Amino acid sequence: RGWNPPPRKKQMDGAGHVKKAKEKAAKAESALKKFSFFSNSQTKYEDAAEAFGDAGKLYLMGKAFPQAADVYEKSADYYLKAKSEFDAATARVKAAEAAQKMGSADRCAYNYKQAIHLYVAPSACYASFAMCFFFLLVFFRFDSSKLLQRYAGLGKSAMAAGAAKKCAELLESENEPTAQAQAIEIYKEAIDLYDAENRPQAANSAREKVATLSAAIGSYEEASAAFEDLGKQALQTNLGKFNAKKWFTNSVLCALARDDSVKARNKLLEFGSLDYSFDASTRDHQLCTALVEAVDNHDPDAIAQAAADYDKVKKLDPWMTKVLLAIKATIHEDELQGGAAPPDDDDAEDLPDLT
C-alpha cells in the first residue's frame, strides 16, 4: 500500500488576507463596545490595540498599505490609552513603514516622529517601580549607579534613535531643501539618543549627516561646527584619529564658503595644534592655507590654482567641488551676505573646471 501525504493547505491570496484583516478590525471595534464587570477599560483598550495590530499585519500581507497604516495608527492610539507607550511606539513604526510603502512621505515621517517621542517617554508603571526600588537601595546603602543607568534606559533610547534615523533618511531622500532641513534636526535628535546609549560610532554617523546636509543647503556655519565636532570626536580613538584631518579640512572649507576667512585661519591653527598629522606639510593643510590667502586677497584664480594643485594628488570629490565653487562665489558675488548659496547639483556631479 502506498502512503499518500496529506493535502497541502491552499495558501491565502491577497484578497483573502484583506478579508481576514477586515474581520480583525471589526473584532477590534467590537472589543471597544464590550462591557464587563470583570474587566476594566485598560484591558478593553489593550484588546482593541492588539486586534488592530493583527489587522495591520494581514493588510500588509495583502499589500493593502493605506489600510495597514490606518489600523496601525489606531493600534498606537489605543495602546496609548492603555498606558503602554512602548507598544504604542512600536505600532507607530509599523504605521510609518506602511505609509512609506504606499508612497506617503509626510505620513511616514509623522509616524516616525510620534514613535521617537513615545520611545523616549518612560512608561509610568516602570518609572514608578524604578523610583521605589531606587529609594530602597539608597535606604539600605547599596550602590545605586547601576540602577540609575537602568532607569535612564527605560525610555528605550536605542529604539528611538533607530526610528529617528529612519525618519531622517526618508526626509533626506526627498532631495528638497525644506525636507533636508527637517532631516538635519531629526539627525540631531538621533545623535543625542545614540550618545545616551553610548554608541559613538552611530552618533558620529549621524553627525556626518548633519554636516554634509548642512553644507548641501548652504548652512555652512552649522556644517563647519559639525565637521569640527566630528574631527574632535575622531581624535578620541586610535582608529578614528586617521579621519580627523579630513573633518578638520571640511570644517575650514565650510568657514571659507561662509566668507569667514578670519575664522578659517584661526581654526586652521587650532586644528593643527590638536592633530599632529594636520600640519603645514600635508596636502590638506596646504590647500586650506592657500584658500584662506586667496579669499583674503579676493583672488579667484588663486582658488582655482589651489584646487588644481590638490586635484593632482588627491582627486576632488563632488562634495568638495561644490564647496570650492561656493568659496569662489564669495569673491564674485560680494553682495551675498553670510556666505554663498550652494551651487547646482549638476555642476558638482560634472566636476567642472574651477579655472
Image: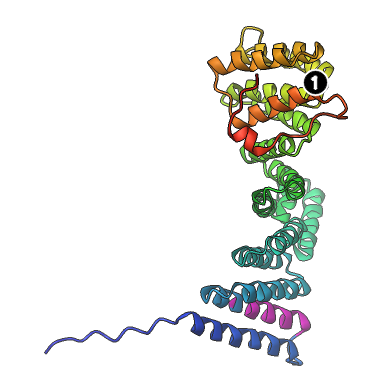
Q: Is residue 306 magenta?
A: no
Residue 41 magenta-highlighted: yes
Q: Nearer the viewer, residue 124 or 326?
A: 326
Which residues fall within the magenta stretch? Answer: 40-54
Residue 138 shown left or right of residue 314 in the figure = right
The residue to which callout 1 is attached is: 331
Q: Return the x and y of residue 8 as percentages of the image width and height.
A: 32, 83
Compared with residue 24, is residue 242 higher up or lower down, i.e. above or below? above
For this view, does 208 lie left or right of residue 1? right
**How many discs appear?**
1
Q: In the image, what residue occupies the spot 65% across and 13% down?
A: 305
Determine which quarter of the picture holds residue 307. top right
Res. 143 in view: no
Closer to the camera, 312 or 214? 312
Q: Which image quadrant: the C terminus?
A: top right
Q: In the rendered view, would you say 137 is above or below 115?
A: above
- For badge 1, the amino acid type reads Ile
Q: Residue at x 76, y 63 (%)?
A: 123
Looking at this rendering, what residue extends furthest in the top direction? 281
- Give 335 or 244, whichever is nearer the viewer: 335
Q: Report the residue at 59% width, 88% height from top.
A: 23
